[in-house]
Amino acid sequence: MSICGVQSGGMEKRLQASHLGPHVHKCRRYAVAQDRLRSHWAKPARQWFEDCGLRLLDWPPHSPEFNAIEYV
């Protein structure tokens, strides 16, 4: 997915709800890893994960060694 411009926490929450929402019931036993993009950690986005009972991993900032796409 490509987004042009600044991504807000509210926009991130809507993306999570539309893409992850239908699968939340299958994902509760897993943790979600996100980078430190500001919109990923905005209050609305974090609140959505909490409301859904999903755990977030504290992903270190600037860590390309953990990002598989960096090696493609």
Image (spheres, rainbow, N blue to C red):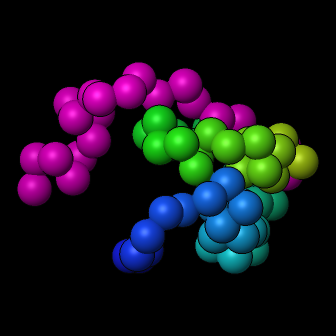
Q: Quadrant of the N terminus?
A: bottom left
- In this picture, residue 52 sits left or right of residue 37: right
**Residue at (62, 59) in percent of width and height:** 8
- In this picture, residue 25 sits left or right of residue 34: right
In the displayed orientation, state which residue is furthest to the front: 5
- Closer to us: 47 or 23: 47
**Residue at (53, 42) in percent of width and height:** 38
- Closer to us: 31 or 69: 69
Q: Quadrant of the C terminus?
A: bottom left
* 33 in relation to 59, above or below: below
Task: Please tell me in which quadrant of the rendered image residue 13 appears.
Answer: bottom right
Range shown magenta: 52-72
Q: Is residue 33 magenta?
A: no
- In this picture, residue 53 sits left or right of residue 57: right
**Residue at (23, 46) in percent of width and height:** 68
Where residue 30 sits: x, y (%)? 64, 41
Where residue 25 sits: x, y (%)? 80, 60
In the displayed orientation, state which residue is furthest to the right: 51
**Residue at (38, 27) in percent of width and height:** 61
Where residue 45 sits: x, y (%)? 72, 50
Task: Please tell me in which quadrant of the rendered image residue 7 appears.
Answer: bottom right
From this viewpoint, is residue 54 visible?
no
Where residue 42 sits: x, y (%)? 68, 43
From this viewpoint, is residue 71 visible?
yes
